[in-house]
Each structure stands twice: as C-alpha cells, then as structure tokens.
Image (cartoon, helix red, strand yellow):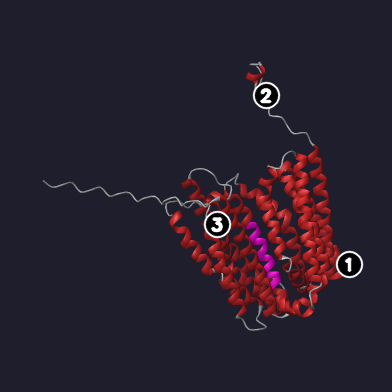
Amino acid sequence: MTRPPRAARPPRPPREPRPLRTRTAVLCSVLDQGVAALTNIVVVLVAARQSTAAGFAVFSVVYTVFAVLLGLCTAHVGQALVLEKGAPRAVRTACRSAVAFTACAAAGAGLLAAAVAAAVPGADGALAAGLAALGLVLPVLLTQDCLRYVCSVLRQPHRALAADLVRLAVAATALALQPAGTGPARLVVVWGLSALPALLLGLALLAPLLRDARTEPVRLLRRGHLGRRFAVEFSVGNAGTQLAVIGLGVWASPLAVGALRGATTLFGPLNVLFNAATGFGPPLLTRAGGPARTARTAALAGGVLAGVAGGWAAVLVLLPAHWGRELLGDTWAAASGLLPATGSQYVLMAFGTCALLTLRVLAPRSTLPLQLVFSLFSVCCLLLGYAAGGVLGAAWGLCAGSGCKAAASWLRAARAARAPVPQPPVSATASGDPGGTS
C-alpha cells in the first residue's frame, strides 16, 4: 500500500526578532543619531581640507541641495513610518514600501537634478558638474538613510548603528584618500558611493525580517498620508532658509555658502543635542505634570542647551588659527569671522527648540503657523543681511531670525501654559440626560 505524497509545507513566516530592552534601544538610537551626525561633520571637514576654497564653496552648494532633499524625504517617509502601528506584517509591509518608494523617488529626483544641471550657472561648469554628480549618487544616499527609520520602527536600532558605523568609516577613509585640490564633482561622487557598503549591509540585515511583506510604494502617495503634512512643516520650517542659501550660491557668491557651511559644520555636535531633545523631549515633558510645570521644565532645558551652545561658541572663537586651518583648510579664513554670529544663533536656537517642544505637548496645532511666518522672516533677514553686510551680514540676519522665532514661540508657549486644562466630556448617560448628545 503506497502512501499518498505529502503536501508541500507552506513557507514559514519570519520569526519575530526579539526587541531590545528599552534602555538598550534608547542608547543605540542616540548612538546611531550621533554617528550619523558625526558622519556629516566628517564629510564636510574632510571635503574642506581636500579642496580649495572655491571648490569647497561649490561642494557646499551641492551639499545644501542634498540637505533639502534629505529633509523632504525624512519628513515624507521617515517621520510617517515611525508612527506605523498595527499587525506586525502590516508594519513590515509599510517598511518595505517606504524603502521602495525612497529608491524610486530618489532616482527620479536624481534624474531631474542631472537634467537641470546644465542650466545652472557656475564657474567653468563646476556647479553644474557637482549637481549632476549628486543626481548620480542620490538614490544610494537617501535609501541608506531610509533604512535607519525602518530599523527604528522594527525596534532594531542596533542594526542601523552597525550600518552607520560602516558608512562613517568608509566615507572618512575614501574622502581622506583623495588628493589635495580634488574637484567638487569628484568629491560628491566619492562621498555618495561611500554609502554603498552601508546600504548593502543594511539591506542584508533587514532582509530576513521583511521577506514575507508586500511592497506597495503607491501607499505613500495616497490621500491622507501623514508624510504630506510633515513635508509641509519641513518646507516652511527649514527648507525655506536652505533654499535661500542655495540662491546665494547660484546667483550671488558660492564663497558665501562655503563660509556659512563651514561655520555651521563646526557647531554640528549641538545639532545632535537638538535632535535628541526633539526626539525624546515630548514624552518626558508629557510626564512633567501640569502645563505650567511643563513650560518651566522646557525653559530649564533650554537654558542648559543655550549654556552648552555658548560654551562651545567660546571654544571655537578662541581656537588658534592653525588649528582652525587643520579643520577647514582654506575655508577657515572666511568661516572664522562668522563664528560669533553663528554661535549667537545657536544659543537662540536652543531656546527656540525647547519652546517648540513645549508647544508640541501643550498646543501642537500652533507650531505650523509659527514655522511658516518666522521661517519666511528668517529668509528675509538672511537676504537683507547679505545685501547690507555681505556674508557676515547674512550670518547675523540668520541670528536675528532665530531670535525672533524663539521669542514668538515662548510667548505662544506661555499663553498655552496659562490656558485651563480641558475637562473630559461627561456622557449623556452619566449626566442623567438620555436625550442629550455625548
């Protein structure tokens, strides 16, 4: 008697990875954020040392274009992805869809950048060549960054940390090996392709976790996707100023952009603190108590961050010139004169960041109008400052814009802290009025 053939076993779903302990996950997330920020700092510093002042100015314009595109991608894809909830398979589908959408959108943006590069004015075509090089490597850069958010939503930040450590090591080594005086287009290509090993490692680490999920990149274009709102907030909050800086480089002076980028890069460690406060601040402020206590806690945190920013600015201002040239090369001569203005701006940004954190907890709908009005105001201050005093005037204009934004944000936060706490509605059944509405 022959036995019937056994039915084929269905493929086993991927085993759910064990999430890290909360403290370990937070530590890995902070470390990953620090490594990513350190990579950006190292890239700019090494590029400044390996190129001339004019070459670094062109590189800075291209890097600023990348910063705008990265911010839009992070807002539309990353910030919406980390809010995904539901069944594990649905979350994995959202992760695969986000990676596919980022790769396709980055390829399209890269082709567009390469197509319009020829129309951009630049000395000997250097700026056009730099933008074309950015279009070539943009899919690698943006997709690798998207994987960080996939690891976050899957509660696997240590995998993102491993990939980002590889990226830091490869980028620093590849750029440092370039000969002195390397052109900006070559620097952009080397910097972009240096992210390829980290991208491949990240895909390999995530593949076992996502193999049973579907890929639906169109879902990120559907109406109601949260990324649309986040992209608008980024556009009015940050992209406006970045685009104004790009405009200075295209139509006025690329050297001004190089000086501004060089000065800002030296304050990169403070950006890590600001990003950490933005990421971990709201949950902590929620547990602070009432609205008034929340505002006082945020104000205290703002004072601490402002003190750190002021101390770091003092260190940079007192830095010996030969040490500064070791950091920024030929760009140090132009960037060093901007350090007092940029340092003052970061002090004010510390207070403004904590004011916006307070509003995110107490009155979240009030942040978008503030971002819209005062980002446009900062752009006006930047342009007016440049018209009045060149690149130094532009730096003080950005400082003035940040100060006004911080003051307005704290005024709004003070009003929100004094507002009465809304009471939960009483149901019709509890109030004894069956004919009412709840």
- Residue neighbourhood size for the residue with mark 2, other residues' Cα within 10 Å, grouped as few (<14), some (14–19), many (≥20): few
Residue in the picture at 81% in, 71% down: 317
| Measured Cα–Cα span from mark 3 to mark 1 | 47 Å
Question: Which amino acid, by three-letter code, is at mark 3?
Answer: Pro
Question: Which amino acid, by three-letter code, is at mark 2?
Answer: Val
- Image coords of residue 199 (percent x, y): 52, 65
- Image coords of residue 290 (percent x, y): 74, 38
| Front-lying residue, 308 or 327 | 308
State the residue position of label 2.
426
| Measured Cα–Cα span from mark 2 to mark 3 | 43 Å
Disc marking residue 157: 3
Residue at the right extreme of this rendering: 388
Residue 371 visible in the displayed image: no
Helix, strand or loop for disc 3? helix
Compared across the picture, whether 255 is left or right of 89 comes to right
Disc marking residue 388: 1
The quadrant where residue 142 appears = bottom right
Q: Nearer the viewer, mark 3 or mark 1?
A: 3
Compared across the picture, whether 41 is left or right of 213 comes to right
Residue in the picture at 58% in, 52% down: 23
- Residue neighbourhood size for the residue with mark 3, other residues' Cα within 10 Å, grouped as few (<14), some (14–19), many (≥20): many
- Magenta segment, which residues? 59-73
| Front-lying residue, 1 or 251 | 1
Whichever of labels 1 and 2 marks the residue nearer the N terminus, that label is: 1
What type of secondary structure mainly makes up the magenta span? helix
Whichever of labels 2 and 3 marks the residue nearer the N terminus, that label is: 3
Residue 335 visible in the displayed image: yes
The answer to whether 289 is drawn above or below residue 246 in the figure is above
